Amino acid sequence: MKNVFFLFALLCAFFSSCSDEDGANVTTSNVKLPHVVTINSGDKVTCSSNTKSQVKVLAFDNEEGFNHFVGILRTKTSQQRAQLVKSLGFESLAMINDKADKELDKIGATASSVDDFRAKYLDYKTKYAGILVANAADSTDLSLYKPASKDTAVAPYLVGECNKVLVDGALRDIPFSDEMNDDDKKIFATSYTEYSPNSTRSVEKDYTSEDSWPVNGFIEKDGNHKTICSVYVTDDFKLFIHFGAQYKMWYGWKRTNRQFFFRLENMEGLDKLNPNALSSNLSPNTYYFGTSKEFYSYTKINFHVAEVTQNPIVMTNKYEVTGKVFVWTDRMSEKDANGNVIYQSTGSSIYPTQHAPRENFPLFKKENSFPCKISLVGKR
């Protein structure tokens, strides 16, 4: 099996070298793209938004055109989907979510008091009511999220304020629920072990007491910052690691952009581990992963780490995955006396390896990480 992460990195590098116009031409030069139409309220359109006199939807000439465009979206990254839909002059649900996220940042920064923030936040939630959804599992989470749909990859780019598309002159529903989407739910609406104030780092003395480490996920609060990690196996036997981050905003928490890095050790029960995930193999069974070679920030990271070894049917468990993961954010990179980030150097004696560490990869030390044990068992 080819290295999935390596191919992903190559594809990202290829598409990022294109301009907005060139990027669209790469895959859609012979395809008639949808156009944007305005639907009046008199057409009895049921929208996922507040009542409005007019809403915009994507219009397709026929079923073939609709299916073709959906297929195009599937071949692209989320950034490329957003770029393509934006080039049509359409504001998708995904774009609305990004805009709302930035708007909340501004509200939090400009509010003069708790009461002022509370009033502005109430107006903010009213504005996006029926379009975006709150985190019902955590009342302290101030962020709004894309609602859940059957096709989480494509659906948020087909609709905007209204959950409709026009195909061959007929309106069609793109169903969404009133709950937050599953990707965000895995991070921001799931209970994990919370580090105590005295064990927020894997200090040397903690290495001898791994029984106190969290298992398969954690929430770490460090002042006004929160780091969230989740490790799980999907129904199709793939190991994933999810990351998320939040920062304190007045009386609650808001998701934020962070760069994440992690190191796996002593992994058992896996097949086809991807060692070249935008970084270098540093030692046997130890791998570093970064968000990208340029270290772009993302709100959350979802890494497909490996395929899970499926046990023979005569065994009690479908799979048994064990190991350790050490987690860092960009705030935790090593710095010199002047506060400058220290980068790994080729041939470092600290990390002896046949493969040189990636150029300008920040230096991270295990004693300054968030450690977590991995113990995932699939019952038959």
Image (cartoon, rainbow, N blue to C red):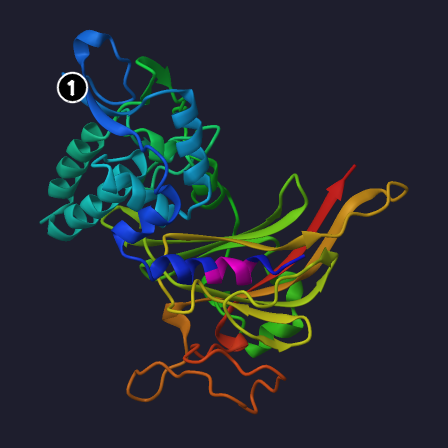
**Front residue of this view, candidates 16 and 103:** 16
In the drawing, does residue 267 fall left or right of residue 4? Answer: right
Q: In which quadrant of the rendered image does the N terminus lie?
A: bottom right
Of all residues, the one furthest to the front in this rendering is 30
The vertical placement of 11 against 352, above or below, is above
x then y, percent, for residue 306: 64, 56
Residue type at tag 1? Gln
Residue 135 relative to residue 287: left or right: left
Quarter occupied by the C terminus: top right
Q: Please check the rendered image and state whether residue 358 is part of the magenta-colored stretch, yes or no.
A: no
Relative to 80, say whether 348 is above or below: below
* Residue found at x 47% / y 77%: 364
The percent position of residue 379, horizontal first and vertical second, equals: 76, 39
Magenta stretch: helix, strand or loop mostly:
helix
Classify 189 as above or below 21: above
Residue furthest left in the image: 112
For the magenta stretch, what is the residue range?
Answer: 5-10
Q: Secondary structure at mark 1?
A: strand
The residue beneath circle 1 is 54
The image quarter in which residue 280 lies: bottom right
Q: Quadrant of residue 215?
A: bottom right
Residue under the image location 28 percent in, 13 percent down:
46
Q: Is residue 184 visible?
A: yes
Q: Position of residue 110 (x, y in %)?
A: 11, 50
In this view, the residue in front, 297 or 277, is 277
Residue nearest the observer in this picture, 376 or 305: 305
Residue 130, x across and y down, in percent: 28, 24
Can you tell which quarter of the image residue 163 is in?
A: top left
Crowdedness of circle 1 by 10 Å Cα count: few (<14), some, many (20+)? Answer: some
Which is more toward the observer, 81 or 121? Answer: 81
